[in-house]
Image (tube, rainbow, N blue to C red):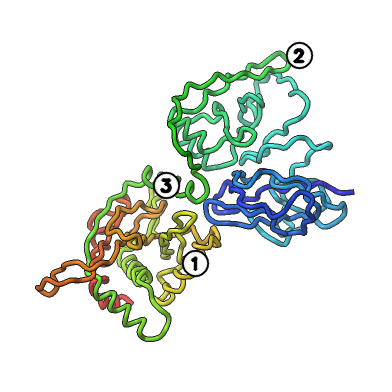
């Protein structure tokens, strides 16, 4: 006899709340082993192969390729032989298992003595449930009509869910980001109708409510006498302006994550930008001399990264973040340097950990390694988070200048334009020199213009006279 186990999309870490199905690796009827990858998904951070913690026969598969799946939603069901590893015990939600898997993703994996949350489904198995919400599991959807609701003076244990299909229960929200966005804009989630699977409330639903274009909420649920069931209320149609014609491209995956982060940066950070032109002729000559020594090649980006770490040591207030809830500026002791990299999947920012402890050669090697991983889509989510300062070399696109948007929650970003031959006054004579424009965007809450200008001037001095940098090594 086999036990049917449901495997849900686990928490992939780094605050991710969902993923897009890129490619199924198994079909219904296939036999899978414990920890065998069953689906390839794309998160806002990277491509991930998701292994299944159960061994058995795939009996069902949820979601087509290209569909977005929230954390906690079913991926597949597996018929596990009773008594085998991973087949004993009741079905477990959120990917927690009884000692079957040796693979670890956040939310499921290698067994341990710690207690796990379990949700036991009655037999026979009811229809598919909504994903688990942070406040607790959502109510099961029974096949029979809902039981009558009786009047009571006690406060309900969980918020009332007012939708057409479920008259009561917890809010169908799994993302803490959605809840926070609703709080920031005073949006009552009880009055929203989710557009996600089975009524799940998504970020887009809250944003439409903020913009005043959300569908009209369902009418309040009336409480009937104890002898009569509550009839679901019907929702009034919303009056929405006609959508403009044109191609619609979903904001999801990396593109959606970039959109969210840049919008948040502009919304929360009072940024300012200053810039300066610098003569990079001597910097390029120093790089040529280093590479002529016959050892590992050094990139221009690595030289600029080393200049940044030296400048941050001189102006540590810029290696910081702002905690508005505590009304504090948090100055960070270590420099984790992010650098913008354009890939086929969109803009990503890999992070060089402890950049302040690395040599120029070490920085060059690590930047090259992370860049290649970014291009192939193999960066782990942890390699794309935790930065404290970002270096953006948009000169590779052939442009001179830009006003960078700060990589929230950091406090500053240095932008570097193309290095191009231009007329320049050098030693009192007009000459053709290799000139670069440096742009520095900073959070005006952490410092004033004097500090920002001092940082940028130090960077420009190191670019023009690399010997200045040697004094800081």
Q: Position of residue 40 (x, y in %)?
A: 63, 54
Sequence-wise, the earlier of marks 3 and 1 is 3
Q: Quadrant of the C terminus?
A: bottom left
Q: Are marks 3 and 2 in contact (CB under 8 Å)?
A: no
Q: Are marks 3 and 1 in contact (CB under 8 Å)?
A: no
Residue under circle 3?
326
Nearer-the-camera pick, 409 or 63: 63
Nearer-the-camera pick, 365 or 168: 365
| Crowd band around label 1 with a 10 angstrom C-alpha radius: few (<14), some (14–19), many (20+) | some
Nearer-the-camera pick, 189 or 360: 360
Residue 173's place in the image compared with 307, above or below, is above
Quarter of the view holding residue 341: bottom left
Q: Position of residue 63 (x, y in %)?
A: 66, 43
| Residue occupying image coordinates x 38% and y 76% | 298
Q: Position of residue 113 (x, y in %)?
A: 74, 57
- Residue 20 shows in the view: yes
Q: Position of residue 297 (x, y in %)?
A: 40, 78
Residue under circle 2?
227
Q: Secondary structure at mark 1?
A: helix
Q: Is residue 342 left or right of residue 48?
A: left
Residue under circle 1?
372
Q: Is residue 467 left or right of residue 173?
A: left
Quarter of the view holding residue 32: bottom right
Residue that lies at the very extreme toward the right in this rendered image = 1
């Amino acid at each position: 006899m086999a036990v049917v186990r449901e495997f849900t999309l686990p928490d992939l870490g780094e605050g991710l709340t969902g993923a897009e199905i890129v490619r199924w690796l198994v079909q219904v009827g296939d036999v899978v082993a414990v920890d065998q990858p069953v689906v390839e998904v794309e998160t806002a951070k990277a491509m991930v192969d998701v292994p299944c913690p159960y061994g058995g026969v795939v009996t069902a598969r949820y979601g087509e390729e290209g569909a977005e799946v929230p954390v906690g939603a079913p991926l597949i069901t597996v018929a596990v032989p009773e008594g085998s590893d991973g087949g004993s015990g009741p079905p477990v939600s959120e990917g927690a298992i009884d000692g079957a898997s040796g693979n670890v993703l956040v939310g499921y994996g290698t067994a341990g003595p710690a207690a796990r949350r379990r949700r036991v489904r009655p037999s026979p198995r009811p229809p598919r449930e909504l994903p688990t919400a942070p406040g607790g599991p959502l109510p099961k959807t029974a096949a029979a009509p809902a039981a009558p609701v009786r009047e009571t003076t006690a406060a309900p244990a969980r918020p009332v869910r007012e939708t057409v299909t479920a008259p009561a229960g917890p809010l169908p929200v799994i993302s803490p980001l959605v809840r926070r966005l609703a709080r920031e804009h005073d949006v009552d989630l009880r009055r929203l109708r989710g557009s996600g699977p089975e009524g799940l409330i998504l970020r887009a639903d809250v944003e439409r409510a903020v913009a005043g274009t959300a569908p009209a909420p369902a009418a309040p649920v009336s409480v009937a006498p104890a002898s009569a069931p509550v009839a679901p209320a019907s929702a009034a149609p919303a009056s929405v302006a006609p959508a403009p014609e044109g191609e619609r491209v979903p904001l999801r995956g990396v593109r959606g994550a970039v959109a969210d982060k840049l919008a948040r940066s502009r919304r929360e950070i009072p940024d300012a930008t200053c810039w300066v032109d610098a003569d990079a002729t001597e910097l390029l000559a120093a790089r040529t001399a280093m590479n002529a020594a016959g050892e590992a090649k050094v990139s221009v980006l690595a030289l600029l990264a080393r200049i940044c770490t030296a400048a941050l040591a001189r102006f540590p207030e810029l290696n910081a973040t702002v905690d508005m809830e505590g009304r504090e500026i948090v100055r960070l002791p270590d420099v984790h340097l992010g650098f913008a990299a354009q890939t086929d999947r969109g803009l990503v920012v890999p992070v060089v950990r402890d950049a302040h402890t690395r040599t120029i050669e070490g920085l060059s090697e690590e930047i090259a390694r992370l860049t290649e991983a970014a291009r192939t889509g193999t960066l782990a989510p942890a390699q794309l988070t935790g930065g404290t300062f970002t270096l953006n070399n948009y000169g590779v696109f052939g442009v001179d200048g830009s006003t960078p948007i700060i990589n929230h929650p950091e406090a500053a970003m240095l932008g570097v334009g193309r290095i191009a031959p231009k007329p320049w006054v050098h030693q009192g004579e007009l000459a053709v020199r290799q000139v670069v424009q440096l742009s520095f965007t900073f959070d005006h809450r952490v410092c004033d213009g004097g500090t920002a200008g001092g940082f940028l001037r130090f960077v420009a001095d190191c670019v023009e006279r690399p010997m200045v940098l040697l004094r800081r090594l």
